[in-house]
Image: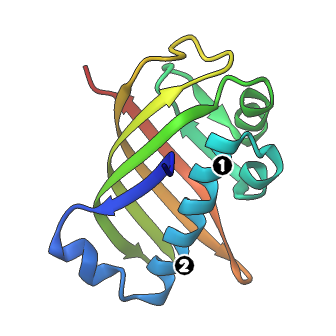
Amino acid sequence: MQNSRWKAGSSEVHEALRDARIAAVMHAVEKVDAALVADEYAVFAAALAPELVVNNPGNIVAASAMVRQLNADGKIAYSQYERLLERASLRSEMVLLMGEESVVPKGRNPLAGQTVRRRFTELWRPEGERWLLSVRQATVVR
């Protein structure tokens, strides 16, 4: 069983995926989510823009260095990561993703072993041939 996956939540998202930039970002998302499940720190870290800022579910605004450290410390690690993509669109040169995710934290995460539902918003920006996560917001849904 694959422990990381995403699915389109509407016909509008399916249509948006025809754009090569959005499709490329979704490929990057697949790699990042799989890296979080497989404990591949370097793959996760490589997808983070230097200017990354995350309003995370722990009610902390974290810059790129802190996000990298939390992952290295086992606090951003999952045994399962699923996304329902409800919006995928272009914002100037960036790609906007919005939706809901269901994760099962592991490792040193305080919610390890529990299924956690979150709403998320992400902005990805291009850098050469790569796409980097520049902004992320995630809120736990009770």
Is 101 left or right of 46, judged from the image as shown?
left
Alpha carbon separation for disc pair 2 and 1: 19 Å
Q: Nearer the viewer, residue 93 or 140?
A: 140
Viewer-closest of 135 and 76: 76
What residue do we see at 76% from left, 55% from top?
Answer: 43
Looking at marks 2 and 1 on the same chain, the residue that comes earlier in the sequence is marked by: 2
Residue 77 vs residue 91, the one in the foreground: 77
Percent from the top left, x then y, of residue 70?
72, 27
Q: Quadrant of the C terminus?
A: top left
Q: Write the residue at 54% across / 51% down.
A: 135
Q: Is residue 13 left or right of residue 10?
A: right
Q: Residue furthest front?
A: 1
Q: Amino acid at mark 2?
A: Ala
Give the image location of residue 76, x and y in percent. 64, 30
Residue 4 left/right relative to 121? right
Of circles 2 and 1, the one toward us is 2
* 141 up-or-down from 86: above or below: above
- Element on which disc 1 rests: strand
Q: Quadrant of residue 5?
A: bottom left
Quadrant in the rendering for residue 7: bottom left
In percent of width and height, residue 6 lies at 39, 57
Coloration of the structure image: rainbow
- Label 2 sits on residue: 24
Q: Which mark is residue 52?
A: 1
User: In which quadrant of the rendered view does residue 8 lie?
Assistant: bottom left
Amino acid marked by disc 1: Leu
| Secondary-structure class at tag 2 | helix
Which residue is drawn at the image coordinates 70% and 58% (left, top)?
A: 47
Work out whether residue 7 or residue 45 is closer to the camera in this orientation and state it: 7
Q: Residues within 10 Å of mark 2 (few under 14, many from 20)?
A: some
